[in-house]
Image (cartoon, rainbow, N blue to C red):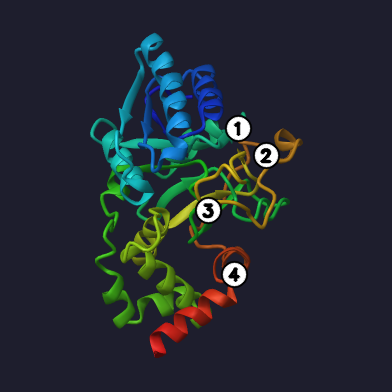
Amino acid sequence: MNANIPVLLITYKRPAKTENLINILIKNNIKDIFIYMDGPSNSSVIEDCKNTRKIIEKFSSKYSNIKTFFKNKNVGMKYGIPEAIDWVFNSFDQVIILEDDCVPSSEFFPFMEQMLNRYKSSSKIGSVCGSNLLSKWNLNKENYFYSKYFNSWGWATWKDRWQKFDRNLDHLEEMKKNKFLRTYLGSYRAYFYWHWILSRVKNKKKDAWDYTWIFTNFINKKLHVTPKINLVSNVGIGLDSSHTKSYPVDYIPSNNINNEFNLDVPGPLDIITDHKFDEEVENKIYSKSIQSRIFWLLKKIF
């Protein structure tokens, strides 16, 4: 991979997974490795956090290309991950971001590099995703497509796109009043969900940053490059996850990934969203929860 593209590793309390991913980064000859680690949120994770930090310090003392950013107190994902991304963009104009539970395939880094170079000057692309929210899509077509929905499990972006990050959701009420969200999302069902979840993030009732990034790209009408198959295995879904205890699709790439994904195959020429994919994602991943929609409506009424 091009040595000029840094990789940011987000970690917290999983020493074994952190060690494995650092080894993968070293094996792939990543020249600049940035590691961000949040502080423990409660006493039950202190030991795991200590062990994770020891692993990181073991590598950083051996490799001069590893830079570290440790938080002594827990700040959470909403503020911590954007701070980590800002940290990298103080030195670089593009970055690949992996969380400690995301194991990249052999095609991940070449794909990221290729897409970062291809869409560097595009005003229509917000980020490049290394994973697919539905696991697979349109296998007989191009290697990738475009979606208005972003996935944070292995991704990349550019400094100029990140500068538009509406970290406090300052434009949320404006977008509600002028009906932009309703029009852009295409259905009341999607609008209800996204206004509900974004309001929770804005009001600090949900510790998340990725919804804010999705919203930022909604209002700037930017799409996300999405591979037709997963190029990342998420091995953190389950009981030891801080947030994602389960997921509705298989998040392990196919064993035939090299046969299914050929980097020499070009992508679609027209940068327009795949509406069928977006509809499937909205229905299966996001606004699938009737309970959340009913709760939101009742709260607005009463």
Callout 2: 10 Å neighbours few (<14), some, many (20+)?
many
Q: Determine contact: label 2, label 1, CB under 8 Å.
A: yes
Callout 4: 10 Å neighbours few (<14), some, many (20+)?
some
Residue 279 got which mark? 4
Residue tagged by mark 2? 261
Q: Residue at x 69, y 55 (%)?
A: 138
User: Is residue 11 in view?
Assistant: no
Q: Could you tell me how far apart the alpha carbons at marks 4 and 3 are, in whole angstroms?
A: 22 Å
Q: Which is more toward the observer, 275 or 25?
A: 25
Q: Amino acid at mark 4?
A: Glu
Q: Amino acid at mark 1?
A: Glu
Residue tagged by mark 1? 107
Q: Earlier in the sequence, mark 4 or mark 1?
A: 1
Q: Earlier in the sequence, mark 2 or mark 1?
A: 1
Mark 4 or 3: the one toward you: 4
Residue tagged by mark 3? 269
Q: Amino acid at mark 3?
A: Leu
Label 3 secondary element: loop
Q: Earlier in the sequence, mark 4 or mark 3?
A: 3
Mark 1 or 3: the one toward you: 1
Q: How many marks?
A: 4
Q: Which is more toward the observer, 47 or 264?
A: 47
